[in-house]
Amino acid sequence: MNNDSIFIIGSAILLIGFNVVYHVSQKSIHTSVNPVVSIIVTFFVALVVSILMLPIFADINNIKAELGHLNWANFLAGISCVGIVVGHVLYYRSGWSLSSGTLFSYVAICIILLPIGLIFFHEKITLQKSAGIIISLVGLYFLIKK
């Protein structure tokens, strides 16, 4: 196994593992907590953890240069993070289940991202990916069917 494979597998494990923790924690937030207060605490903790991780990923003596590499996407991602967290808090409070609600939203997101990836990022669609999309759509149908 080469370094690229280890990086790909490791990043997937990190993403999946923390997504599981994220959704379980979002589903477990007490309904009496104001969603905005919850988000403030969530992002405060994220800020502290990010600052602690900074020396691992960047030369802390070169922060000014790092800031120079930012663009509009970084700011839009920040706004999106707030929307995602608010959405999940309200999503679970409205009664969506941890299992099917999350599956529904992620399949829907993937289907919406498909044409964006094709048009703006020149990603390719294969027969295998097409089959996966069809299976996902069928699954989505069964999830929302009463």
Image: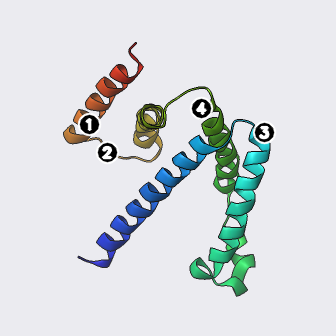
Q: Amino acid at mark 3?
A: Asn
Residue at image mark 1: 132
Q: Residues within 10 Å of mark 4 (few under 14, many from 20)?
A: some
Q: Identify the mark at residue 34; answer none if there is no mark.
A: 3
Amino acid, disc 2: Lys
- The single residue placed furthest to the left in the displayed view is 127
Q: Quadrant of the N terminus?
A: bottom left
Residue assigned mark 4: 91
Instruction: Check whether the beta carbons of the residues at disc 1 and disc 3 lie within 8 A of each other.
Output: no
Q: Earlier in the sequence, mark 4 or mark 1?
A: 4
Mark 4 or 3, closer to the camera? 3
In the rendered image, the quadrant that contains the C terminus is top left
Task: Inspect the image, locate mark 1, and give the three-letter code of the amino acid beneath it.
Answer: Gly
Label 2 or label 4, whichever lies nearer to me, is 4
Residue 79 percent across, percent down from the top left: 70, 46
Marks 2/4 in contact by CB < 8 Å: the verdict is no
- The circle drawn on residue 124 is 2
| Residue 123 at x, y percent in the picture | 37, 47
Q: Residue at x 68, y 39 (%)?
A: 86
Q: Nearer the viewer, residue 11 or 30?
A: 30
Instruction: Tell me which numbered mark, 2 or 3, is placed earlier along the sequence.
Output: 3
Mark 4 residue element = helix
Separation of marks 1 and 3 at Cα, in angstroms: 39 Å
